[in-house]
Amino acid sequence: MSDEEKKLSISRHNILSLVDSFIDQIFQIRKTLRGVSISAIILAPLAIALSIYLLLNPSFFAVLEVEDEFGFILSILLGAVIIISSIWIITGIRQYRLVDSWNKRYNEYINNKEEIDRKIISRYGLDNNNKS
């Protein structure tokens, strides 16, 4: 093998290693995204339930009657919590599904990579310790 071929081979290996590293980092980020989506699925309904409870509570109407301006602003804020939490639930469910599909594709990638590595090793008579 000439020096240029060796440099090209090393360059290709470095690029493949970089791509593998990038994919591994994305897989690690996936865990964080899954946690965020699960928290959205759990916390948003709690925020909605609490807001609805406050809006339907008879004491809330007493506050509205006594404190006109404060009650009006509080009603708007509780409505905003319900709307934003609803959007957060939908986003969390979509994100969870997306991350789950990433997991399936990542597993397929790993399996394909291992299969290609085995074929290369068997074809060229390499063993696992002599990869370069």
Image (cartoon, helix red, strand yellow):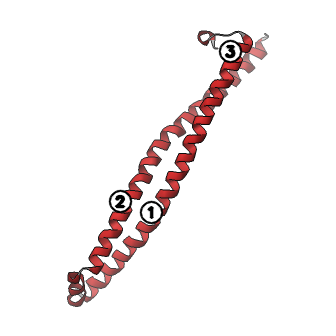
Does residue 91 sit above or below 2 in this rendering?
below
- Residue 132, image x and y in percent? 64, 14
Q: Residue 72, how many percent across, how many down?
A: 31, 85
Q: Which residue is mark 3?
A: 121
Q: What's the amino acid at mark 1?
A: Trp
Q: Nearer the viewer, mark 3 or mark 1?
A: 3
68 vs 95: above or below: below
Q: Is residue 85 left or right of residue 24?
A: left
Mark 3 vs 1, N-terminal side: 1
Judged from the image, the secondary structure of the residue bearing numbered disc 3 is helix
Count of number-bearing discs:
3
Residue on which disc 1 sits: 88
In the rendered structure, the answer to whether residue 83 lies left or right of residue 27 reads: left
Residue at coordinates 20% horizontally, 89% vertically from top-left? 66
Amino acid found under the numbered disc labelled 2: Leu
Query: Residue placed at 20% from the left, 82% from the top?
Result: 59
Going from N to C along the chain, the mark reached first, 1 or 2, is 2
Snapshot quadrant of residue 79: bottom left
- CB under 8 Å between discs 2 and 3: no
Give the amino acid at mark 3.
Ile
Task: Classify mark 2: helix, strand or loop.
Answer: helix
How many residues crowd mark 3 within 10 Å: few (<14), some (14–19), many (20+)?
some
Residue at x 71%, y 9% (from the top left corner): 125
Q: Which mark is residue 43?
A: 2
Chain-order first, disc 2 or disc 3: 2
Using the numbered discs, state the Cα–Cα distance from disc 3 to disc 1 in whole angstroms: 48 Å
**x 41%, y 52%: residue:** 38
Q: Which mark is residue 116?
A: none
Residues tagged 1 and 2 counted as in contact (Cβ below 8 A): yes
